[in-house]
Image: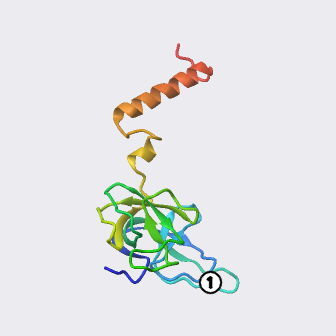
Amino acid sequence: MALGTQARTNQEGETMTYTPAATVNSCTVVQVDDLRAGVIVNRLTVDADGTQSGGAMVKGVFKVRKDSSAFVVGDQVFWDKDGTGVDGTTGGAATTTTQAPASGFPLGRATEADGTAVDTGVVALNVLGRSDNIANGDGTLADLVTKFNSLLTTLENNQILNNA
């Protein structure tokens, strides 16, 4: 199903003010000032003095144009501003489940499984996965306890924490 745009709202979310450097069409994926991913709500034009601003949704679930990556539920998804979609659209920025490209940024997590030939994927914007929340671990409680105990030991060894 071709979208005709970079993204389409699949579930409402949270909006923040966004001031573009140039005119941006609605349903365009952008990286907002705090480096989160956002989707433009309404077409934004820039006044001569650069003061025009509008809304970018930074939370919610969106159907986005994707490259030939297969999506598995929970996969971290990146936005590639120079990517090519399965539908052959270039310069329109496809999503990818590989490492963040030089021209990209983290987008969110896949919420539906999609094959390599599917031209859209469903992504929850700016959602951390369990491996992001527990750095480089498997996301289990045992892993969290191990990392916490390691931190305590380091603090005690450096005399930052006294376990008396």
Q: Residues within 10 Å of mark 1 (few under 14, many from 20)?
A: some
Residue at x-position 35% and y-position 72%? 120
Residue at x-position 44% and y-position 77%? 6
Could you say which is closer to the camera, residue 21 or residue 18? 21
Residue underneath mark 1? 46
Find residue 53 and report its image quarter.
Answer: bottom right
91 to 62, vertically: above or below: below
Q: Residue 58, can we see it?
A: no
| Quadrant of the frame with the N terminus | bottom left
Q: Residue furthest right?
A: 49
* Numbered disc 1: secondary structure: loop
As shown in the figure, which amino acid type bears the numbered disc 1?
Val
How did the renderer colour the structure?
Answer: rainbow
Q: How many marks?
A: 1
Q: Residue 37, can we see it?
A: yes
72 to 131, vertically: above or below: below
**Percent x, y for residue 119?**
35, 74
Q: Give the left or right position of residue 119, taking residue 28 as reference.
A: left
Find residue 13 and report its image quarter.
Answer: bottom left
